């Protein structure tokens, strides 16, 4: 799963990226620090999931989620906030996000929440095989093509 991290705090972005880097199923494909930049990068990178800070300078996480949902309906959006995630859930869903996680509990909640967005069963295994084969091909300089 390709993930774009959108948070104006560099330390949060780095910490989240580090946490995600330990799982071969997850790939951080980019980082952004504003809503506007997130919209541009999402169009360019086409991630599977965007971890989106609710309170960024300029465009809010709510507005960014609304625009992302209009422009890239297939991308999953998970809002991150220091506010109570359960309390925020109705408003983030109304904005078009798929869920919300409390930043104070990222260490214990983030991976489990992301795993809920992963494809199940054979889709996960096929993705692992494709990624491992592509990584091997890249390391050896060989070209790799696989038909589905």
Image (cartoon, rainbow, N blue to C red):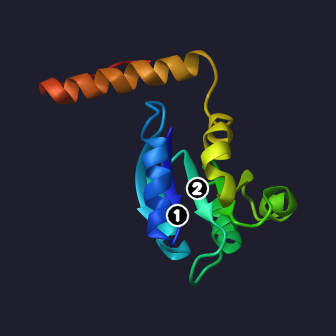
Of all residues, the one furthest to the left in this rendering is: 141
Using the rendered view, name the quadrant where residue 79 is placed.
Answer: bottom right
Pinpoint residue 76: horizontal percent, then vertical percent.
64, 48
Residue at the spot of label 2: 51
Q: Are marks 1 and 2 in contact (CB under 8 Å)?
A: yes
**19 versus 135 height, above or below:** below
Q: Residues within 10 Å of mark 1 (few under 14, many from 20)?
A: many
Label for residue 6? 1
Q: Secondary structure at mark 1?
A: strand
**74 versus 69 height, above or below:** above
Q: Residue at x 54, y 44 (%)?
A: 48
Front position in the image: 33 or 141: 33
Residue 140, visible in the rendered structure = yes
Pinpoint residue 29: horizontal percent, then vertical percent.
40, 50
Q: Secondary structure at mark 2?
A: strand
Front position in the image: 41 or 146: 41
The reply, left or right, for residue 11 in relation to residue 121 is left
Using the rendered view, name the quadrant where residue 64 is placed.
Answer: bottom right
Q: Residues within 10 Å of mark 2 (few under 14, many from 20)?
A: many
Q: Residue at x 19, y 25 (%)?
A: 143
Q: Residue at x 65, y 43 (%)?
A: 108
Q: Residue at x 44, y 18 (%)?
A: 148
The reply, left or right, for residue 115 in relation to residue 26 is right
Of all residues, the one furthest to the bottom in this rendering is: 58
Pinpoint residue 123: horizontal percent, then vertical percent.
56, 21
**Disc 1 to disc 2, C-alpha distance:** 6 Å
Pinpoint residue 3: horizontal percent, then vertical percent.
50, 48
């Amino acid at each position: 799963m390709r993930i774009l991290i959108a948070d104006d705090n560099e330390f949060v972005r780095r910490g989240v990226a580090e946490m995600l880097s330990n799982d071969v199923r997850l790939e951080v494909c980019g980082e952004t620090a504003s809503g506007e930049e997130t919209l541009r990068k999402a169009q360019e990178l086409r991630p599977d999931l965007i971890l989106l800070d609710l309170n960024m300078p300029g465009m809010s996480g709510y507005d960014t989620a609304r625009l992302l949902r209009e422009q890239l309906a297939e991308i999953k959006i998970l809002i991150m906030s220091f506010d109570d995630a359960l309390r925020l859930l109705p408003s983030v869903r109304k904005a078009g996000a798929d869920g919300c996680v409390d930043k104070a509990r990222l260490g214990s909640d983030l991976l489990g929440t992301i795993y809920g967005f992963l494809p199940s069963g054979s889709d996960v295994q096929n993705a692992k095989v494709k990624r491992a084969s592509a990584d091997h091909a890249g390391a050896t300089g060989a070209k790799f093509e696989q038909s589905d």
